[in-house]
Amino acid sequence: MLSGGGLLVCRPPAFSNDGRKLLVCTANTVSIYTVATALLVTELVGHKGQVTTVIVVPAPANECKCWTSSMDATLRLWDFNTATALCTLQVSRPVISMAIPGFLSCPIDHDKKQQLYAFLSFDWKGNYDGQLDDWGGRLKIYDVMKMKEVKGQLKLKYRQRLLVVSPSGNYIGVADRRVIHIWKSLDEEIVNVKEVKKIRLHHIKEFSTLAFHPSDTIVAGGDVTGRILIWRGVGEHSLFSANTDEQDESFSYHMERFDVRAKDDVMSRTTWHWHQSAVNFLSFSSDGAYLYSGAKEGVFVIWQMETGKRRYLPRLGGPLLFFTNSPEPSLFSISCADNKILFVNISTMTVERSIEGIKPPSSLQEKFRHLSCFSPAVDYKGGMLVLPAENHTVQFYDLYYDRAVSEVQVSQRNYIPAIETTVLVTLVALSGEASVMGTVEYKLPEEGVGCGYSLKFWAAESGSGKFSLSTVIDEPHSDAGVSDLTFHPWMNMAVSTSNGGNFKIWIESKSTSRSNEFGQGRGWRCQSVGSYKGKAMLCAAFSADGSLLAVGAGGLVTFWNPETNSLVSVIGDSLDSRSISSLSFVPRSEHHLVTISKGLNPCLSVWNLSTLSIWWSYQLPVEAIATDPDRPNFAVLVPLPVHVRDKLKTEKDAVIVLFTVEDPIPVAAWAVRKGVGGKVMFMQESALLHEEDINKSKQAENRLIFLNKDHEYVVFNSYSDDDDEAHLVPSERFSSMKDPGMSGYRTMFGNIPAQELNIDKSSHMANQNVIRAPTSHPWDSIFSGPSHVLPPLARVGAAFLESLLEKRSLQQF
């Protein structure tokens, strides 16, 4: 069983001590990538709930340990070099965020036992000691060394807030509505939470993030309106006083302070404003001279602390969520909302490489769910998932290696994250050999005018993995929307359906007499149009041999000859108020058709085409259906009713059921999470496994794929009992753990600028097996760049000669 996908950017990542690996919270696991190649090397598997925090233990570069917190109410210590759990600490509730300031406030001494406390934030869900409480969160402290909870707790208004630790480890802060809470960490033993000193910073707007200066008593806070507030002299009276109560009485709040609210223990406050939306992250540079910020605009902003001047790194592709500093001063990572982590070189202000996951669905998907089903497509032989994304693109994603392969820009409109999108890619479909791709996009009305659909056909370029635009059809069904798009199994023919009451058959025209508007001698044209009594047509499917076309018309199924567009037969009840939303032929069963009806009494029906009658049926709601191309089987995704989930006490909200067309008794079933809004698909095993793996198996079978609404997927071996957790992550996914290290040229001058390449899957996989051995002579690579980008000899001569000399430390006598 394979699994993958999911969000890489739901929590901040963490760099290893040597800066060569990045630890990323991915659902219930921690994925570890190499910084040099951005490839996955291993995963930490063990948590039963979502991982919410990962903290690397400061230690020598050769030690690889980290703490993680999870929604399964546990803290775990890992050796991420061997991917093994060293210990587990059970806590009282699911952990929203964790901070361990002791790692930074004092050096790790393995020979001396030290006090180590973990600050944990919990979701209290409005109930504490049996009484309703408006305070939604709690902050508790756990003694990690003694593995016990410290007495007392602190209340928070917001539940989902991340704890922030100062670079020195002396302070912990959290943004809680219009207040920033700051606590001072203690080196001595803590008996009660009340012993921890704290101050508050107030604002008239809600805070969204905060950051601590690395060396000075300066705190930066960002609010939901895009403002950045800089407080100086924070806590110099409250946090540094031996007796907080005595300090409060002696501290004069009416002393001269600039732009400071009453009773805020700060000397001055400065306000900057550039962002148009809520500030998502703030972070100071290692020397404290600059402040970094990011928000929904997708622009990385660098503020100079002394002057307030700004520099920008624009067009990063999506809203910016998190910023993570690296042990290497010139490198850091930025997590973007389009499920991408960027590695940015601050000296050159360029993105060196990126880690890309499955792009999340459009934020407008639920709002415009009536337009179409927003279905993904599957390259059955290439092992790739094809999904529409919010930034007007279609993404090709390799399921086996769990990584993005390429993208196709569907719309030429500029995507601006800060502005609500005006174009939605609603449908994508591939032909049987993946030689042609069809997309449907919907343009939202602007000020009530200008809306409409566009149908586009794309031709695959041989051997490159790219698609070039072939034909554009604006308003393919006049003013009505496009509800479905499907291709003929072996001909260059496609059919689109519309809720306006008709369907159209499109064929490829290979005319060489004239070229189309894109300069090509071929294009797609409408061959015929069909309708049945004006009923809305929501879905269509070709038979396995392509000789029959089935189109759902209201509660009926109409059969057509695709060559002549003549009506062959009609089945169903014309008085049925239910509408057929999906249908599919069973390829290995010549006389069976599966339909899904939605309405007051949803129904799953299997039809016998020999008798034109229902063979068997179930009255139950079905989210999605998939047919096995090599067996007379099909799978359906069925949501579980709330009372069933409550009775079973399970978090799984749907069931995947596998049937044969001859028998209504299920062959197999799997309970899944986040099933509502999900999809099921079949894919050939040869596309998912290596050739040697198939030879070892008894029989090559098709795999069943489940994709949930959060774009997490699981690949089931639907005809084997060997689906255990041991096969969850194949070793072939992981890149080599060996790191060739940094060349002398890159150490001094950064990476050599490279042109952006379009990744071809076959060449990309082949190049991964080529491992370059590291050289023992650093000067071999110091001049390894192109001649037009190499610096002058006078600039590198001193550094080159210094690398040849052996440094010796002077001994004092």
Image (tube, helix red, strand yellow):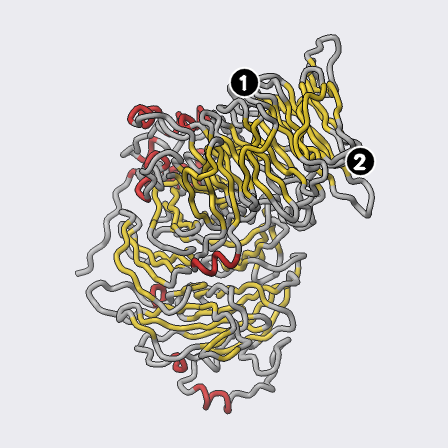
Which label sits in the foreground, 1 or 2? 2
Three-letter code for the amino acid on which mark 2 is drawn? Asp
Residue bearing the label numbered 2: 479
Q: As rendered, which of 751 and 75 lies closer to the eye?
A: 75
Task: Specify few, some or many for label 2: CA neighbours under 10 Å numbering under 14, 14-19, or 20 or more.
Answer: few
Q: In which quarter of the image is the N terminus?
A: top left
Residue bearing the label numbered 1: 462
Give the farthest residue toward the top.
Answer: 513
Taking the spot 68% from the left edge, 24% from the top edge, the residue there is 569
Image side of residue 244 versus residue 416, left or right:
left
Three-letter code for the amino acid on which mark 1 is drawn? Ser
Taking the spot 48% from the left edge, 71% from the top edge, the residue there is 124
List x then y, in percent, for residue 103: 34, 64
Relative to 322, say whether 480 is above or below: above
Query: Residue 278's quadrant in the figure?
Result: bottom right
Query: Residue 723's quadrant in the figure?
Result: top left
Of label 1 and label 2, which has the lower sequence position? 1
Task: Specify few, some or many for label 1: CA neighbours under 10 Å numbering under 14, 14-19, or 20 or more.
Answer: few
Q: What element carries label 2?
A: loop
Image side of residue 442 versus residue 156, left or right:
right
List x then y, in percent, for residue 607: 57, 31
Q: Does the image show residue 796? A: no
Relative to 275, say whether 692 is above or below: above
Q: As rendered, which of 771 and 625 lies closer to the eye?
A: 625
Q: Is mark 1 on a helix, strand or loop?
A: loop
Image side of residue 28 versus residue 317, left or right:
left
Numbered tag placed on residue 470 in the rendering: none
Q: Are marks 1 and 2 in contact (CB under 8 Å)?
A: no
Taking the spot 54% from the left edge, 18% from the top edge, the residue there is 462
